[in-house]
Structure formats: structure tokens, C-alpha cells
């Protein structure tokens, strides 16, 4: 099993991992790699982090149900849910979730044991120089509030002593890869990425870890936060660019990844609530672009020398469609269009009377009430919310029309599909079913996703042409 | 081979038909000739029944290879109706063209034979559907699956 350890550092890491999970569900290929997400955010009780854990569990549940054939295991599907996600705890045969426990409850002052320093101690003066009183009084349970100087100190120790890092070093083998996702303008991501990279490249006793092919995506500022004077927050997005510049200057001579992807916006188009406790930021196109970097990384060989990667869009539009995105995004658009079509089938088929596969493949009431299909429904609801957020954010990623089941040839904006309504997809599902022998396997849920993908792909593959 | 015997149950026999003219020799001979002529063409009349099979095949294969939720039973019933009326009309027109019903009661016989043919075709449509639903590949809902 080839593995890619995906380290998701900070809030941006979490949100990008969400987009990765969505793209994997929609059929984006990891090139045979099993994804091992490692979520690195000291922020305790962060709703986004819990939601990501729940999303990944949901994904895994669906994936496992597609490969389960009673006593045997089937190959992964082509299309939807084609790649496996395994948590680092599962890899380590660990029951307790060390990922949930990443976080510290004390204040930074107490964490560095500042009280142990006498007032005339040189180290005390050093601490006072490097950290403001706000830094020192900052509770670490809500992250590093955009302060990489705090993050560098805390994360360094957090990584070295962590069970997940030991597990990573134990399980990282030759041909495995590492991918690090972080933002450069905050606290956790900006400090976490170089630290983590240093720990990996410095693993002298584990050559597979030290020499692993490593990629990273660094997200440049892409959203602003409301004025801290009105919100009382400690984070001021006016400093994002200054922080970015200094971090980039540091990265220039220190980063050791084989591929480094830079993703960013031209300006801070979207302004979110400035609440570091909640961070209820909606899905953003930039996170989707960052997510696509993982798939690009997994399709590339080890380079001779470090590669710095970036990608552009065709037109600087507020709402992006296939044309304004440009040909480089065809695969992403196809994936999203495909899953939204799957959603249409998932919503409509349980109410579809006399659908022949209810007889031939057991897609009947019991099937639709079964845990596997219900799990797919839950995931699909999350997917829909994610896409809705993407399509209404600034800038909007909105390449599809999905609200009219009777005018589906306009499903992709700026392109006509041959399927005029959902009956075209239902027919293709039936035809796909006829190609499979009844005794290939006995997993109806797998058949459902197989037939649905074949039906959808038949019409949407022209996006890639 | 007297194929019109197949319609005796609905159209009566030749004897039934010609006996109504037994007191009028000319008409009796004309009725006999008319029936004989109809019997000559009876093979065509029977072939029309096969429209029931053709329409069932059309329903289960080409029609259900088209989008539009054609698998729903309502389309099967529509095809059933089409079979009935198509065979009824085709048979009647065929009879009318090959042997014009000029004798009293001849029109009624032709209509009843057409009706019988339509019933036979419907029966064939039903049997073909039963076979298809149980043993042959289709995209249609297998309404008659046992």
C-alpha cells in the first residue's frame, strides 16, 4: 500500500483537507496512494476540526462499504470514492484518537514556564523581546492567533513528542510520500510548515522518512477578517501581507520540499467574522485550488531539483465557470459536476417508481434505507453545502447549474451536455448494469456507485475533451 | 389449411355465414365464394397477429434504449393498446381491400375477425412480454416477472 501522509496545518489545512476529501469523493484519483490525513491544529474544540473528522469518517465508511464483499475485499472503484483514506490511529492500530487530542489548554506564558525565570534573568529579557504581553497571555487552546513566533515554540515540542509523529515515522516506508498543507499568513500554518519539514528531513534514523518525496502547498492571503477594533480580536488581517512577505523571505532559503505549490488571491476578496474561537469560514475557491495541488503532486515523479508550482485562471471573473477558469481546471469542474449529478440521482432514485434496477440489482426500499446508502446521503448533503459555499463565496467557483432537473443539458455553464434530463442518466445506469454479470460480486451499494459513475461519466467526459 | 377456423369463436364458421343465404341461391353461392376468397388471404390475416410480437420486441429493446423513463409500466400498457388497435385496424383494412364486404353480414364478419385478430395479437404481446420479463435482457421494468 503506497501512502501519502497529508499534514494539514492550522485552519487553512483543515479547510483544504475538506476540499481534498470532496474531490476524492467526486472521483479525483490519488494515483493509487492511500491518503493518511494528519490534522495539526492546537485549537481545541474547533467545530471545523470536528466537522472534518466527521467528514473523513463518513468518507471512510462509504469507501469501506464499496470494497466490502462479505468475506473478501474488492478493488477500489473507478470514479466516486476511488481512493482510500486511513487515519494515522488506524495505521497505528490505536483506538484512542490522538488527532482529537492535539491541543493545549494553558496560556503561552505558563507553557514556556516564564514564572520560573527571575526578573533579571537574561532569558526573561529575551522572552520579553520576542513576545508581547498579549502573546504571553494568549490561551493556546484557540491556536496561535496569527502569531508564528508563538507557534514556532509550541509546535516544535508538540511535533517531537506527539504519538502521531512517532506513528508517522514508524509507518512511513520507501515510496510513501508526504504532503504538507498550510497557510503562510497566520500563526499555526506559517510556523508549522517549516518546522514539520525540518523534523522530517532531519529524521536521520529513519531514511524512508528523511528521503521521502515531499510536496507542500502554501496558501497566501486569500481572505480578510473584520476590523479587530470592532470585534475585539487579536488578529488583524491588515498584517497578512507583511507576515507573508517575511515568511516567504524565510522560506526562500529553508524549505526542503521537492514540490512547493503557491496558491493565493490577488486581493482579500472575502471578509469573514474575526472570531478565532469559531472560525466559521465558508469554503473558498482558493482552498479548492490548494486541494488540487495534492493530486498534481501525486501524479509527478521525484524531480531533479526543487520545483515551485503555481496555477492561474483564464479570466479574472468574480464568478468562475469552465471558460473563465481555463482548461487547467477541467478535471476539477468535471469532478464537481459529476458529484452534483450523483446527488441528483441519490435524491431522486428512492422516489423513482418502477426503476428496473430495483428488481435486477436490489435498489429497493430496503436498499435506500440501508446504512450504506444513508451514509452516502449524509456525505452528499455535506458535499452540497460545500459546493453551495464555494459557489456563493468571493470569488465564486460556480461552473454548474444544478437546480433544474428538466434542463440538464445546461448542467455545465458554457457547455452543452447531451443529456437533456435525468432520464438520460437513469437509462445509462440500466445499460451499465447490463454489462455486469450478476455474480461479479454481491455488493449492491458498489453496483449503485459503479452504474451511477458510468452513466454520469458517459455524458460529462466531454468536459475533458 | 383453413385458418379462418381460428376465428370461429368470434366470427362464426363458413356454414354459419352462408346458411343465412340458403334460401337465396345466388347469394348463397356469392357468400361461399366470398368466404373462400377470405380464406385464401387468411394467411396474411394471421401474419398480422405477429405485430403483437413485433411491438413487444420493439417495446423491450429499441424503445427502452431511448431516454424518457420508458421502463415505466404505463408505456407497456400504451404499447398493449397500440397493439390491439393497430392489429384491429390493419386486419380490417386488409380484409376490406382483399375481399370487399358487399354481402349483408360480411362487414360484421370482417370486423369480428379483426377483433379476434386484435385479441390474439394482444395475447401474443402478453406472452412475448412474459418471456422477455423472465429470461431476456431489457432496460424495461419486468412487470410480468414471476
Image (cartoon, coloured by chain):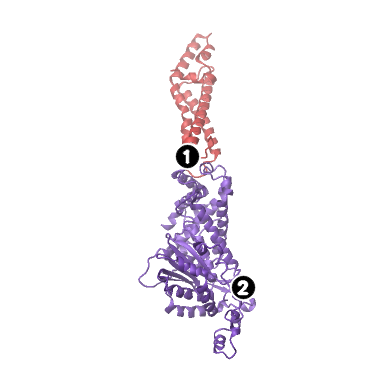
Chain colours: A purple, B red
**Mark number for residue B138?**
1
A153 shown above or below A422? below
Q: Same chain for the residues at labels 2 and 1, yes or no?
A: no
Instruction: State how far apart marks 2 and 1 are (Cα).
Output: 59 Å
Which residue is located at x 49 percent, y 35 percent?
A: B134
Q: Nearer the viewer, residue A318 or A101?
A: A101
Residues packed near mark 1 inside 10 Å, few (<14), some (14 to 19) or many (20 plus): many
Residue pointed to by mark 2:
A275
User: For the C terminus of chain A, which image quadrant?
Assistant: bottom left
Q: Quadrant of the N terminus of chain A?
A: bottom left
For disc 1, the chain is B
Residue A282's spot in the image, x, y percent?
57, 66
The residue sitting at the left extreme is: A304
Residue beneath the point at 39% across and 73% down: A306
Residue A410, above or below A45: above
Spot occupied by residue A82 in the image (x, y as percentages of width and height): 47, 56
Q: Nearer the viewer, residue A13 or A390?
A: A13
Amino acid at each position: 500500500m503506497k501512502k501519502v501522509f497529508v499534514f494539514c496545518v492550522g485552519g487553512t489545512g483543515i479547510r483544504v483537507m475538506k476540499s481534498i476529501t470532496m474531490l476524492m469523493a467526486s472521483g479525483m484519483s490519488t494515483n493509487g496512494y492511500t491518503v493518511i490525513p494528519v490534522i495539526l491544529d492546537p485549537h481545541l474544540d474547533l467545530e471545523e476540526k470536528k466537522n472534518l473528522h466527521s467528514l473523513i469518517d463518513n468518507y471512510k465508511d462509504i469507501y469501506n462499504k464499496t470494497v466490502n464483499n462479505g468475506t473478501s475485499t474488492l478493488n477500489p472503484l473507478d470514479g466516486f470514492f476511488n481512493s482510500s483514506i486511513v487515519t494515522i490511529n488506524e495505521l497505528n492500530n490505536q483506538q484512542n484518537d490522538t488527532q482529537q487530542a492535539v491541543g493545549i489548554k494553558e496560556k503561552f506564558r505558563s507553557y514556556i514556564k516564564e514564572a520560573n525565570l527571575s526578573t533579571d534573568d537574561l532569558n526573561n529579557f529575551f522572552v520579553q523581546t520576542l513576545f508581547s504581553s498579549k502573546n504571553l497571555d494568549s490561551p493556546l487552546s484557540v491556536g496561535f492567533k496569527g502569531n508564528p513566533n508563538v507557534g514556532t515554540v509550541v509546535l516544535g515540542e508538540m511535533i517531537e513528542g506527539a504519538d502521531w509523529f512517532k506513528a508517522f515515522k514508524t509507518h512511513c516506508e520507501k515510496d510513501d510520500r508526504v504532503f504538507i498543507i498550510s497557510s503562510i499568513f497566520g500563526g499555526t500554518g506559517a510556523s508549522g510548515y517549516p518546522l514539520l519539514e525540518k523534523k522530517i528531513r532531519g529524521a536521520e534514523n529513519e531514511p524512508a522518512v528523511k528521503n521521502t518525496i515531499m510536496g507542500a502547498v502554501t496558501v497566501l492571503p486569500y481572505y480578510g477578517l473584520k476590523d479587530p477594533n470592532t470585534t475585539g480580536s487579536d488578529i488583524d488581517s491588515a498584517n497578512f501581507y507583511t507576515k507573508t512577505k517575511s515568511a516567504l523571505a524565510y522560506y526562500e532559503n529553508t524549505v526542503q520540499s521537492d514540490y512547493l505549490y503557491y496558491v493565493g488571491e490577488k486581493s482579500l476578496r472575502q471578509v469573514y467574522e474575526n472570531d478565532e474561537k469559531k472560525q466559521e469560514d465558508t469554503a473558498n475557491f482558493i482552498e479548492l485550488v490548494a486541494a488540487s495541488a495534492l493530486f498534481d503532486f501525486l501524479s509527478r515523479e521525484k524531480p531533479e531539483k526543487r520545483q515551485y508550482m503555481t496555477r492561474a485562471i483564464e479570466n479574472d471573473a468574480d464568478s468562475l465557470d469552465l471558460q473563465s477558469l481555463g482548461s487547467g481546471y477541467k478535471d476539477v469542474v468535471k469532478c464537481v459536476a459529476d458529484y452534483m449529478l450523483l446527488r441528483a440521482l441519490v435524491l431522486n432514485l428512492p422516489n423513482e417508481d418502477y426503476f428496473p434496477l430495483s428488481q435486477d440489482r436490489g435498489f429497493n426500499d430496503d436498499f435506500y434505507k440501508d446504512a450504506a446508502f444513508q451514509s452516502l446521503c449524509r456525505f452528499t448533503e455535506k458535499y452540497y453545502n460545500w459546493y453551495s459555499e464555494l459557489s456563493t463565496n468571493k470569488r465564486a467557483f460556480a461552473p454548474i447549474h444544478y437546480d433544474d432537473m428538466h434542463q440538464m443539458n445546461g448542467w455545465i455553464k458554457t457547455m452543452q451536455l447531451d443529456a437533456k434530463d435525468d432520464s438520460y442518466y437513469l437509462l445509462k445506469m440500466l445499460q451499465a448494469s447490463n454489462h455486469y454479470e450478476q455474480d461479479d460480486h454481491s455488493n449492491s451499494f458498489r453496483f449503485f456507485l459503479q452504474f451511477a459513475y458510468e452513466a454520469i461519466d458517459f455524458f460529462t467526459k466531454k468536459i475533458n475533451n | 389449411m383453413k385458418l379462418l377456423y381460428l376465428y370461429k369463436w368470434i366470427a362464426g364458421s363458413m356454414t354459419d355465414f352462408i346458411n343465412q343465404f340458403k334460401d337465396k341461391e345466388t347469394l348463397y353461392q356469392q357468400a361461399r365464394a366470398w368466404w373462400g376468397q377470405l380464406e385464401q388471404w387468411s394467411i396474411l390475416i394471421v401474419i398480422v397477429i405477429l405485430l403483437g410480437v413485433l411491438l413487444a420486441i420493439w417495446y423491450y429493446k429499441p424503445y427502452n434504449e431511448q431516454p424518457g423513463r420508458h421502463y415505466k409500466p404505463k408505456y407497456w400498457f400504451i404499447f398493449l393498446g397500440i397493439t390491439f388497435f393497430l392489429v384491429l385496424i390493419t386486419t380490417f383494412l386488409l380484409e376490406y381491400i382483399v375481399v370487399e364486404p358487399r354481402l349483408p353480414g360480411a362487414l360484421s364478419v370482417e370486423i369480428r375477425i379483426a377483433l379476434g385478430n386484435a385479441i390474439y395479437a394482444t395475447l401474443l404481446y402478453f406472452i412475448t412480454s412474459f418471456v422477455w420479463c423472465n429470461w431476456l435482457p431489457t432496460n424495461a421494468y419486468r412487470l410480468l416477472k414471476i
